[in-house]
Amino acid sequence: MPTYDYICAKCGHEIETFQSMNDAALKQCPACRKAGLKRQVGGGAGLIFKGSGFYITDYKKKSGTPDAKPDAKPASKPTESKPAAAAAAK
C-alpha cells in the first residue's frame, strides 16, 4: 500500500498514513478535529529490496573461486589470413 502525506490547512499538523489507492482522501485532522486535511504531492517511494539481500546473492565473492588477475591481458583474437594474403599479392 502506498504512503500518503497530509497537512492540515487549519492547524499545520502533518501526518503520514498508509492507504489503499482506492481509499478516499482523509478530510478530518486528527490533531484539531477540523476538516482541513490536504493531500500533499509525494516524491514516490524509496527502493525496497526483498529477500536474502542484493549484495550477498549477486556480488559477494563465493568461497573457493579464484580472484581475477588485475594485470592479465585479454585473450588475443586469432589473426585472419586474408589481410596478409592481400598484402603479399600487391
Image (cartoon, grey):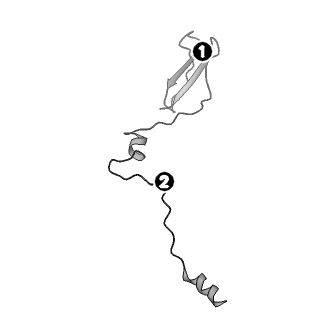
Apparent side of residue 51 relative to residue 70 in the rendered image (left or right): left
Percent coordinates x, y for residue 73 in the rendering: 50, 61
Percent coordinates x, y for residue 19 in the rendering: 49, 28
Q: In the rendered structure, which amino acid carries the disc numbered 1?
A: Ala
**Residue pointed to by mark 1:** 35
**Residue pointed to by mark 2:** 70
Residue at the right extreme, as displayed: 90
| Image height of 7 relative to 70, above or below | above
Mark number, residue 2 = none
| Image height of 47 relative to 71, above or below | above
Nearest the camera: 57 or 71? 71
Q: CA distance from mark 1 to mark 2?
A: 66 Å
The kind of secondary structure element at disc 2 is: loop
Residue sitting at 50 percent across and 63 percent down?
74
Residue at the bottom extreme, as displayed: 89
> Does the CB distance between marks 1 and 2 fall below 8 Å?
no
Nearest the camera: 30 or 59? 59
Residue sitting at 51 percent across and 23 percent down?
17
Residue sitting at 55 percent across and 10 percent down?
31
Label 1 neighbour load within 10 Å: few <14, some 14-19, many 20+: some
| Image height of 62 relative to 43, above or below | below
Residue at the left extreme, as displayed: 64
The image quadrant that residue 55 belongs to is top left
Residue 59 visible to the viewer: yes
Label 2 neighbour load within 10 Å: few <14, some 14-19, many 20+: few
Q: Nearer the viewer, mark 1 or mark 2?
A: 2
